[in-house]
Image (spheres, helix red, strand yellow):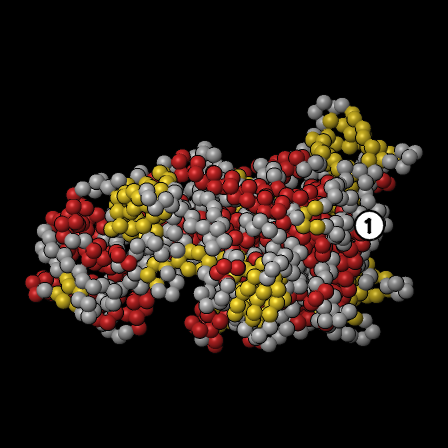
Amino acid sequence: MHNVLTRFDFVLIKHSQNTFYSFIKQLNSNFENKCFYFRNFHFVNFVSICFNTQNKIDLNKKNKTIFCKHKSLHNYKYSICNNSYRNSDYIAKMSSEKNVKKHCEHVNLRGENCSVCNNVMESKESKLENGLSNMHSYDYDYIVIGGGPGGMASAKEAAANGAKVLLLDFVKPSNQGTKWGLGGTCVNVGCVPKKLMHYAGHMGSLFKLDSESYGWECEKIQHDWDKLINTVQSHIHSLNFSYTVGLRSSKVKYINGLAKLKNMNTVSYYLKGDKTKEVDVSGKYILIATGCRPNIPEDVEGAKELSITSDDIFSLKKVPGKTLIVGASYVALECAGFLNSLGYDVSVAVRSIVLRGFDQQCANKVKTYMIEQGILFLDGILPKKLTKENNGQIKVLFSNGNSELYDTVLYATGRKGDTQGLNLQTLNITVDKNSNKIITDKYSSTNISNIFAVGDVAFNCPELAPVCIKAGEILARRLFKKSNEIMDYTYIPTAIYTPIEYGSCGYSEEKAYDTFGKENVEIFLQEFNNLEISAVHRKKHKKAQKDEFDIDIGSTCLSKLICLKNEDNVVIGFHYVGPNAGEVTQGMALALKLKVKKSDFDNCIGIHPTDAESFMNLSITLSSGLSFSAKGGCGGGKCG
Amino acid sequence: MAAMAVALRGLGGRFRWRTQAVAGGVRVAARGAAAAQLGRKVAVVDYVEPSPRGTRWGLGGTCVNVGCIPKKLMHQAALLGGLIRDAPHYGWEVAQPVPHDWRKMAEAVQNHVKSLNWGHRVQLQDRKVKYFNIKASFVDEHTVCGVAKGGKEILLSADHIIIATGGRPRYPTHIEGALEYGITSDDIFWLKESPGKTLVVGASYVALECAGFLTGIGLDTTVMIRSIPLRGFDQQMSSMVIEHMESHGTQFLRGCAPSRVRRLPDGHLQVTWEDCTTGKEDTGTFDTVLWAIGRVPDTRSLNLEKAGVDTSPDTQKILVDSREGTSVPHIYAIGDVVEGRPELTPTAIMAGRLLVQRLFGGSSDLMDYDNVPTTVFTPLEYGCVGLSEEEAVARHGQEHVEVYHAHYKPLEFTVAGRDASQCYVKMVCLREPPQLVLGLHFLGPNAGEVTQGFALGIKCGASYAQVMRTVGIHPTCSEEVVKLRISKRSGLDPTVTGCG
C-alpha cells in the first residue's frame, strides 16, 4: 500500500492539542465531512508523521501507540498514510482490492486527510500557528492569478461572501505580438470571437447555398474580412471594459500585473508587466487560473516565426487568404470551418485522426461535411519547414516531400498550461511535465493546501469556460461560505462549432467500449437530413463533387445515444452532429445527469419540426447492422 | 381530409380488415405501419377535401402539407431575411434591401412537400399497408365505404378502426365575404403568387406564425386580435411574443373584430371591423385576408352516428377515454380530431404508436399527456414545456411557487445591434426544496432545439437544484437556463450581463 504514496517528501506536525484542534476547526470551515476529525482527533496530543523521500512512512512510536489505541484512528492512520493526490484513482484501486471494506468506509475522508497532510506538510510548526492565530494578517484573503472566466468568477464569488480579493491579470503577447485585455481566452481569443466568426461563416453558407431557394437573391456577395474583425474586436473591447467594471462593482481589486509566487502566502507581480516594478502582496489563499496558450512544436523550422495561432486569427490585420491549418483539434477544425465559409481556400494538415477523444463516428461526420464544403484534408501529413517567400507568402515543405505556398499558416496543435514564470518549482507545486498543467485534487487544491488551481491550467480538467466558472465559484464558496459542495466533473456537455456543429455529453463509443466492454454497450443512432437544409438541396462544393451527378450534400445530421445494456439502457453518452448542436445538447446534459434511460427518451414527446426531436425516436441499434439512415425528409421527426 | 387505417384478411369478395383507420395522414401512417409490423393487415384511407379556395394536397396530413413543415420552411425564409439585414455587421456586403421572391420560395417549399408525400406513400407500401385515396364514411360500426376515382364504391370492414382525420381551419361564416374572399392556413403555403399586404385574423399560434413569416419576408402584415393572444400559453410569454412581433414590424389591431369583407373594383379586399370597446367602425384594404381563428375537427362527413361514435356537442370533436377508445369499443380516435388533446403531430404519433402496441403488441402503456413540449415558430421562437406560471399558481398556490427568470442577450444579437428585449427565459418551480421544476418557458432563437432536452429532463423529474448543477455550453442561449439565479420573488433585476 505504501507505494500509493508518491508525492510527499516529508510531513512533520508537532504541536499542542489546542492548536491542532483549532487547525482542524479551520479546515472544517473549508472542507466537508470534517466532524470526523473532531470526534477522533481532539484527544490526540501529538501527531507526527514522516514521509521520507523513499516514499516510506515513518510514524514515530508514540503516535503509533496513540493511533492503535483507537480502532477508528487505526483506520485513519492508514488514510493518512495512503494519501494520494488522485483520490478517485486511489479509491478505485482500493475498491478493487479484497478485504479493504474497512478502509473503504473511510474513503470519503481520504480527500480531507489529504488536506490535513498537505497543510501540515507545508507548514512549519511556527507558520501553522502563526497562520491560525493571525488569520487576518494578510493583505488579502484571496489572491487570484489570471482574469479569465474561472479567475473572475471565483474572485467575484469570494468577494460576494465577504473576502478581500485581489485579481492579477496580465496577457503576455503571442509570438506575433498579439495582445488583449481582461477576460481570458474565452472572451478574447476563444469562444466568443470563434462563435461570432462561425456565425459569420454560417451566414455566408446560408446566403451562398440556400438563400435563392428561400426567395432571396444574394448569392454573389463578397466578404470583407476587416469589417468582421472590426465588429468582433469592438465587441470584445466592450466586454473587456464591462469586466473591469464588473470586478469593481463586485469589490474585487484588479491589478494589471504579471504575477509569480514567492512563497505559499506571497505573490509578487510586475505592474503592467514592467520588470522594474515588482510589488509583493500576501494572501491567505491563492488561486492560479492562468489558463493555457497555444503550443507550436519546436521542431518545425520557421513555425514559431511565421505561423499564427488562435491567439492571432481573431484580430488578424491582413486578410488570411489561402490558409493552411496544422492540427486536428476542435480549434483547428473550427478555424478551418469559418475561414472556408467566409470564402478562403483552406487546407488542414492532420497527423492521424480528427477530434481525438471525441466520438470518432461523429468526428468523421464533421470531417466529411467539411470536405463537402471544399476544405482539403491532408491526412497523415505534417509541415517540416516553413520559409518566407519574397512576395510575403509562406512556403511549406511537408513530410511527404511536397511543398505548397500559403498566405497564412495557423497552428492548432494543442495547448499548454500557462505556468512558466509562476515560479511553481520553488514551492514544489506539482506540475504535469507534458502539459505544463498543475495537478489538483477534487477540491481544486494543489499539493499546497492554500494554493488552488481551476480552469484550463488544472491538469485533467476539461478546457471549457463554464466548467472553470463553476469550479471557481464552488471553490470560493468552500473557502468563504462554509459550503461543502465540490465540483462534479461528470456529464459535462460541450459543442464544437464546425460548419456542421457537434454537441456531446458523456462517453464516446470508443470510451464506452473501453470502460464497459463492447458487449455491455448498446448504441442507438440515426442519420437524417435537417429540414431547412434538405428542403433546398444544399450543394456540395465543386471541389468535392466526384461527377456531374454528385451534387447534393450527404445527410447533415447524426443522433447517437450510448447506453448500458445491463442497466436498463441507462444513457451514458449523447452525441449530436447537426445545426445548433449547442442548443440541442444543453438540456440533454441535464437529463444525462439525472441518469436518463433510453425508455425515457422514447416516452418524451418530440417538438416538431426540430432536429432535437430525433432523439425521441431512435429505434435502430448499431449492433443490429441495419441501416440507420432515416427515410423521409422532415428533419429529426417522423411526420409520416 | 380523411384517412382510415384498416387491417385484415380478405373474406369473400369484400375486404375485411383487422385494423382500419379513418385518419389524417400522418398519424395513420405511423399507426398503420406499426400494426403491419405487428403482423396485422392494415389499410389507410386518406382523402383531402379541397379547401374552399380549391387548395388540395397529398398524403401526410396537416403537418406535412399545410402545417409544421411548410410553416417551418417559410419561417426559415423569414429568418434568412433577418440574417441578410444583419449581414453587413459580419462583413458581408449585400446591397440592401434585398427583395424577396415569393414564387421561388413557394416553389421550393411545395416541391419539398410533394417529395414528402411521395416518401410517405413509399413507406406505407414498404410496410405493406394498403392505401386508399378515397373519402370514407361509416356504414356501420365495422364498415366504412368510399368512392374511388373511377366511381367504383369500395367497402372496407375491420375489427379495429382508428379515426385520425384531424382538423381544418374554421371560417367565420357569419361574416359577410369571409368564405368568398378569405383564405386560411390550408391555402397560404400553396399560393403561387405573393399574398401582398395581408390581414391575419386570429390570435392562435397559427395566426402569429403566419403573420411572423409574412412580415419577415417583407410583406405589410397586420394581425387582428379580438381578445388575448396564444390562449392557453403562459400569458407573460405570449405578450412578449406580441411585443417582439410589433417591434419586428407586424402591425396589431387589438380588441377588434371584423364585420365584413368586400372586393373593391381594383381587386383589393376592403375589410370593415369594429373596435370591441368603443364600438367604432374602421376599414382597411388588403390584398389577402387570412383567417386563423381556430380549427374544427374533420368529423362531419364521417357519418359517425352510423357507427355510434359520440362527439362533443360544442366542438364536434370525438370523445375518448385514456385508452383513446371512443364510445364504441373497437373504434379509436387520436390526434387533432379528439376532444381535449394537444393539437401536435408528435403527440398524435406517439398516441397512435402506443395504441397499436396496446391493441396488438400486448402492451398496457397509456399515453401521458403531461409535460408535452411545444414550440411556437414566431420570429422570436417560443418554446415551452409543463405548466405556465398561471397554471402553477392555480394548482399549487402563489406561496408554493418560485419562478426563476432572466433577460438574456444572444451573442449574435449583440454584435448585430439587434434588440433583445424579449429574449427571456423563465422556469417555474415548486418553492419547497429541492424545488421540482414544473414548467420551462424560453423565448429566443432556436427555442425548439433548446426546449427538447429540458423537456426530457423535466420528464425525468428535474429539480431546480439539479438544473443548476448542470454545466453550461458556452456560448449558447440554452446555457441561460442552467444559469437562472434570480427569482421573481426577490425583485432583483433579471438582466444577464457578461459575454452573452
Examine the rendering and report whether any part of residue B329 can be seen: no
Left or right, B318 with respect to B492, comes to right
Chain containing the residue with disc 1: B
Mark 1 Cα-neighbour bin, 10 Å: few <14, some 14–19, many ≥20: some
Badge count: 1
Q: Residue at x 69, y 31 (%)?
A: B254
Rendered location of residue A42, percent (x, y): 13, 53
The residue shown at (72%, 22%) is B278
Q: Nearer the viewer, residue A421 or B207?
A: A421
| Percent position of residue B281, x then y | 78, 25
| Quadrant assignment, res A105 | bottom left
Quadrant in which the C terminus of chain A appears: bottom right
Question: Most extreme residue toward the front, as rendered?
Answer: A390
Between residues A104 and A325, which one lies in front from this camera angle? A325
Residue on which disc 1 sits: B103
Across and down, in percent, residue A293 comes to 44, 56
Residue depicted at x 87% and y 34%: B262
**Is A136 in front, or is A228?**
A228
Residue sticking out furthest to the right: B265
Considering only vertical position in the picture, is B284 above or below B323?
Answer: above
Three-letter amino acid code at the position of disc 1: Arg
**Residue in view at x 59 percent, y 39 percent:** B420
Q: Secondary structure at mark 1?
A: helix
- The answer to whether A422 is drawn above or below residue B29 in the figure is above
Q: Could you say which is closer to the camera, residue B254 or residue A277?
A: A277
Residue B25 position, x and y percent, is 73, 59
Point out the image quarter for the N terminus of chain A. Answer: bottom left
In this view, B225 is above or below B22: above
Task: Kindly tell me whether residue A169 is visible in this rendering.
Answer: yes
